[in-house]
Amino acid sequence: MCFSHTYDLIMSALMTLLALKCFEWSSLLYTLKHAGEHRNFSQ
């Protein structure tokens, strides 16, 4: 029981970290893409 509960906590923590990383990367990629388009547009 205790092990199962700890496992659930660890998995939910990992999922949260994974979601944060995915959000970080997607926002970073979006920013880079947007900056690239803006630079091309201003030339």
Image (spheres, rainbow, N blue to C red):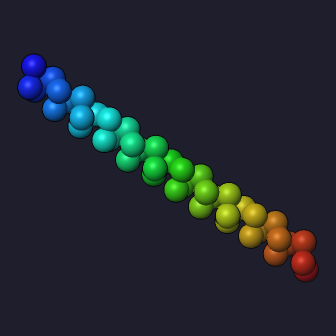
Q: Is residue 3 above or below residue 12?
A: above
24 to the left or right of 34: left
The residue shown at (10%, 19%) is: 1
Residue 27 to residue 12: above or below: below
Q: Classify the position of the C terminus by image quarter.
A: bottom right
Please give the name of the residue rendered at 17% of the width and 27% of the height, measured from the top-left corner: 5
Q: Nearer the viewer, residue 35 or 6?
A: 6
Residue 38 in picture, x, y percent from top left: 83, 71
Identity of the residue furthest to the top in this view: 1
Residue 16, position as x, y percentages in the image: 39, 43
Task: Looking at this view, name the residue that lies furthest to the bottom.
Answer: 43
Residue 7 vs residue 28, the one in the foreground: 7
Residue 4 placement, left or right of 34: left
Left-right relation of 38 to 20: right
Residue 26, percent from left and from top? 59, 52
At x 10%, y 26%, the residue is 3
Of 3 and 22, nearer the camera is: 3
Question: Is 36 located above or below residue 30 in the figure?
Answer: below
Residue at the (31%, 41%) spot, across then down? 13
